[in-house]
Image (tube, rainbow, N blue to C red):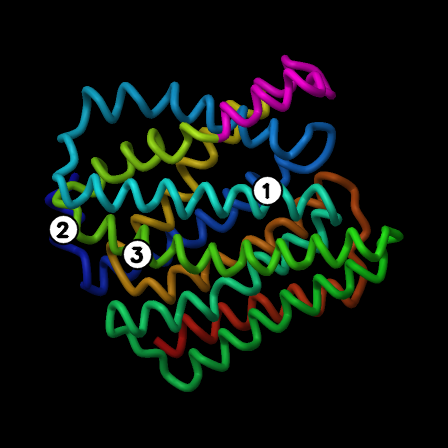
Amino acid sequence: MTEWINEIAGTPAGAQLATALALMSALAHAVFGALQKGRHDPWMIRGAIDTWLVVLSAPIALFLVPWPTPTTFLILLGAMAVHFAYKVTVALAYERAAYTVVYPVIRGTGPLITVVGASVLFSEHFTALQWAGVGVLSGAMLLLALRNMAAEQVDLRALKLGLVWAFAGGVLVACYTVWDAYGIRQSPDPFTFLAWFFFLTALDFPILAALRARRFGVPGGVRSLALRGLSGALIAWVSFGGVMMATRLDKVGEAAVLRETSTVFAALIGWFILGETVGPRRLILMAGIALGAVMVEIGG
């Protein structure tokens, strides 16, 4: 499998597979985000997900894939720091403002910064049509956040703090996307990087969640939390693993933009599964997000 991936990287076949992986990752990430919404504290649900990631990833990392090279291991240590900062900002954003407000801000901020970073580090260059697509997609996401904000009745101070943390989360999305792409590209075996990535970057939040549970208990129940954590861990492998493999096969910027169609999938999940009202304005903005992604893909 590794040899085949290395052979098709940078080829038209690799680009097609990267597109499919990025879209699959977008759908999985929408489900992943929905799991963190609702009855459980955002710190605890993330801790439960990471606990299962450690349990599921440790045997693969330790026994089934080659061990990382010293360079790969140093990059993994950097990934631990970046992803920890990202998870903290997301938890703080979810604590203070509604999921439907902060999620589009986090995902809408990331693509533009990612494309700039990929241009500098990987010498990737977008065409004018692709840049326009990034603008349409990010703009539609931010407008969607404003539309959802208008429907919420919350404390303004808490909302402002939530938006600040959401913007910080978006910046860190760009940082980890570029950093992880660099890591998986330089690793001789991409599956080594993925297995050790999920194992090492999940070591932090179980500790924070345990401390929080000790102080506040486990609202929503331990069984429900554990089941959501297991589901989230399995989905994380598809979501984060899929987009990282896409960046191994093709352009980092294009994979990052396509993945942000997760906002469309999140809205569709809310509409068809959770029974949420979408309305004509949200439909138009969702169409704008999809249009931006299509522009990026066609322009390339």
- Camera-nearest label, 3 or 2: 3
The numbered mark at residue 249 is: none
Q: CA distance from mark 2 to mark 1?
A: 31 Å
Asked if 53 appears above or below 129 in the picture, the reply is above
Q: Which residues are magenta?
A: 205-226
- Asked whether 295 or 51 is in front, the reply is 51
Q: Residue at label 2?
A: 6
The type of residue carrying mark 3 is Thr
Towards the viewer: 6 or 219: 219
The correct choice, above or below, for 87 with respect to 62 in the image is below
At x 71%, y 51%, the residue is: 100
Q: Main secondary structure of the magenta part?
A: helix
Q: Which quarter shows the N terminus?
A: top left
> Residue 176 colored magenta?
no
Which of the two discs, 2 and 1, labels the residue nearer the N terminus? 2
Report whether 3 appears left or right of 207. left
| Residue that sits furthest to the right in the current view | 153
Q: Give the residue type at disc 2.
A: Asn
Residue topped by disc 3: 247
Residue at image coords 63%, 36%? 36
Q: Is residue 17 visible?
A: no
Residue placed under numbered mark 1 in the picture: 33
Measuring from the top left, give residue 64's x and y in whole percent.
Answer: 19, 23
